[in-house]
Amino acid sequence: MFLLVSAQSTSTINTGDIIFQIFSFLFLLAIPAVIILLVVVLRKKNNRLKRVEEKADKLLKDKERDKR
């Protein structure tokens, strides 16, 4: 009788266990998502910086041509 009761109690799923598993799964999904987000943001920032540098170089060249 005791074995039957203990077998039933171990097969139940606690709400806390479900919540913990969901948070653990979401955390595991969040790690690659954050890494991908960082790569995309840094790449956009790098491209924007390159465009600004090109514009600054162009303005400096135009300024030098105007002085001559």
Image (tube, rainbow, N blue to C red):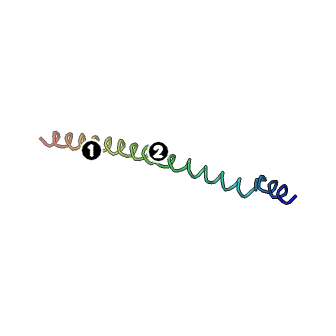
Marks 2 and 1 in Cβ contact (< 8 Å): no
Q: Position of residue 10 (x, y in %)?
A: 77, 56
Nearer-the-camera pick, 57 or 11: 11
Give the residue at mark 2. 36
Q: Amino acid at mark 2?
A: Ile
Q: Residue at x 63, y 54 (%)?
A: 23
Nearer-the-camera pick, 2 or 54: 2
When asked about the image quadrant of residue 48, the answer is: top left
- Cα gap from disc 2 to disc 1, whole angstroms: 30 Å
Q: Earlier along the polypeptide chain: callout 2 or callout 1?
A: 2
Q: Position of residue 14 (x, y in %)?
A: 76, 56
Task: Classify residue 35 as left or right of residue 7.
Answer: left
Q: Residue furthest left?
A: 68
Task: Classify residue 12 as left or right of residue 37.
Answer: right
Q: Residues within 10 Å of mark 1 (few under 14, many from 20)?
A: few
Q: Which mark is residue 56?
A: 1
Q: Residue at x 60, y 50 (%)?
A: 26
Q: Residue at x 76, y 53 (%)?
A: 13
